[in-house]
Amino acid sequence: MTSLERKESLIRITLLLVAFSAVSVLVMITFFIFGEGTPIMLRYGLKKFLFNLDWFPTQGSYGLLPMIVGSILVTSGALMIGVPFGLAGAVFLTEFSSKKMRRIIKPVIELLAGIPSVVYGFMGVVVLVPFIRETFGGPGLSVLAASIILGIMILPTIISISIDSLEAVPPSYREGSIALGATRWQTTRMVMFPAARSGILASIILGMGRAIGETMAVIMIAGNAIAIPRTPLEPVRTLTSNIALEMAYASGEHREALFATGVILFLIIMVLNTAANLTSRKRGR
């Protein structure tokens, strides 16, 4: 074996060890969370843990249903805001804007992903919450406020991946449609969107994962009330907020219940990421 081959072999082994170290860290985190959270779920009862309405740790009552519903409502609201605006922005930048404008606007949109979530939460508290309180009533800290902020936060994910998906469609698709007499919008709606469907769906799923896993901004503007909201103007608490707010002083069964909350959240996000990977592979094929 020559010296060059030995160097290449050493580099290959080193990269393999680095890759396995990343996987091993994920495996250790998974075992730790499940090891801490699973016993109380089995002892308390999975059905009772997931569907009980009462969360009173001092009384030994651990019902996650208000937080699960809160996470679903906030995430759904964020998708209702972020998906239409994100897809509209992606279509405009891909199909209707000039290349010069796209080179300027796309990096600016991607820059939004680098803004700390606490800044979004601060802007929500200072600007959005008073506006909702004065315009629609209620405390202002609500499902609506959290949905709007999260809808803005997921825009970079949806726009960037959707743009890449639309740009990956062969130019012949667009050219053939226009040559047959279709307008630019008809081509976009009937040809480009179906061809890039799996990539666009992956962007929405990843945006959903970002929204459901967000913590700091939601703590600041959602109100954190442990109750199922009846209207979008009422406060709510999410799974992530529940963990962040109570972990500092939790002990015993209370601490185990918070780890069990993390198990539920972990499973939800893993399902979303797996769905995104499957749709991305479908696009590749």
Image (cartoon, rainbow, N blue to C red):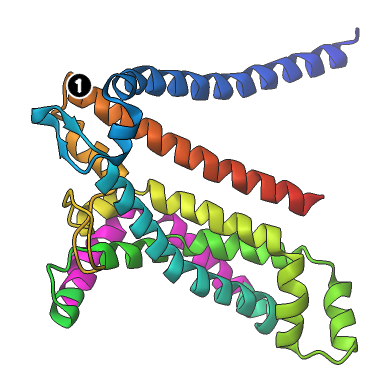
Number of numbered tags placed on the structure image: 1
Residue 40 versus residue 46: which sits nearer the camera? 46
- In this figure, which residue is indicated by the disc labeled 1? 253
Residue at left offset 38%, top offset 65%: 77
**Does residue 215 show up magenta in the picture?**
no
Residue 29 versus residue 156: which sits nearer the camera? 29
When asked about the image quadrant of residue 13, the answer is top right
Q: Secondary structure at mark 1?
A: helix
Badge 1 amino acid: Glu
Left or right: residue 83 versus residue 132 is: right
Above or below 191: residue 19: above
When asked about the image quadrant of residue 134, the answer is bottom left
How crowded pointer 1 is (Cα within 10 Å; few <14, some 14-19, many 20+) is rated as some
Residue at left offset 56%, top offset 77%: 88
* Residue 123 seen in this snapshot: no
Q: Which residues are magenta?
A: 103-131
Q: Quadrant of the N terminus?
A: top right
Looking at the picture, how far across and down is residue 118, in whole percent? 28, 53
**Does residue 122 show up magenta in the picture?**
yes
Residue 82 versus residue 51: which sits nearer the camera? 51
